Image: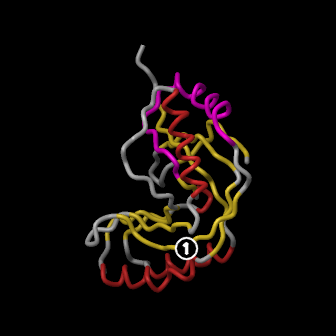
Amino acid sequence: MENQYYRTFIGLPLSVEPPFLQARNNLMRCFEGERISWTNPEQYHVTLRFIGDTEQSLIKRIGSEMHAGMTVPDPASLDVVKLDSFGPRKRPRVIWVGFGETDLFESLRSEVDRVLERCGIPAGNQPFRAHLTLGRVRGLRDLHNYYLTLEAMEQKFNSTVRFEKLVFFRSIPGPRGPEYRVLEEILF
């Protein structure tokens, strides 16, 4: 019998305040006509570790190891301090916001890596930068305006977001973007 796989990741869902959502809506209006897939605010999270195709037989073990092997932090409110873009300058791929304090993310990322290594999933060698993806750039007509808009809008995103749990997610691709299902969660 062939193994079944789930596409998985471990992340930190977050809640945002109305001023953040207003800034997001303004940014979307500024980019009307550009090909950008915007993240649904109900799916906002910071990915600590993208695992990818995960054997279903490992799902329960990963959840158990998370509960047994992780130090649970207190709920945290962190400041958003940066609006930027990933990808080559001439072909940006992701619009994101970053945080002023990164200790929470780095600490939890290390713990997640240890848990996954105990489950036989080695740590990756990709650099880690904690961020919240606002949108994925599919194509731009006006690259110069894109960067001017990001610079002009950066101060609008200065707000605080709240983290209250760590979640092991299943990501199910779909025509309107991925659907995320909770496999396991640890409340702070």
| Number of residue marks | 1
In the rendered image, the vertical position of residue 124 relative to residue 148, given as above or below: above
Q: Nearer the viewer, residue 123 or 35?
A: 123
Residue 58, given in percent of the width and then of the height, sits at 53, 25
Which type of secondary structure does the marked residue at label 1 adopt? strand
Q: Amino acid at mark 1?
A: Val
Quadrant (top left/top right/bottom left/bottom right) for the N terminus? top left
Asked if the stretch drawn in magenta spans residue 96, the answer is no
Residue 3, given in percent of the width and then of the height, sits at 43, 21
In the image, taking residue 105 as reference, residue 75 lies left or right, namely right
Residue visible at 43% across and 68% down in the picture: 95
Q: Nearer the viewer, residue 175 or 141?
A: 141
In the rendered image, the vertical position of residue 141 relative to residue 58, given as above or below: below
In the rendered image, the vertical position of residue 81 relative to residue 65, given as above or below: below
Q: Nearer the viewer, residue 51 or 178?
A: 51
In the image, taking residue 50 as reference, residue 86 lies left or right, namely left
Residue visible at 52% across and 61% down in the picture: 132
Start-end of magenta stretch: 47-71
Colour scheme of the picture: secondary structure
Determine which quarter of the picture holds residue 2.
Answer: top left
Residue identified by numbered label 1: 81
Residue 154, given in percent of the width and then of the height, sits at 50, 80
Q: Residue furthest left?
A: 90
Residue visible at 52% across and 51% down in the picture: 47
Q: Residue furthest top?
A: 1
Residue 171, given in percent of the width and then of the height, sits at 51, 43
Q: Nearer the viewer, residue 78 or 61?
A: 78
In the image, taking residue 121 as reference, residue 158 lies left or right, namely right
Q: Residues within 10 Å of mark 1 (few under 14, many from 20)?
A: some
Residue visible at 51% across and 33% down in the picture: 116
Determine which quarter of the picture holds residue 168.
Answer: top right
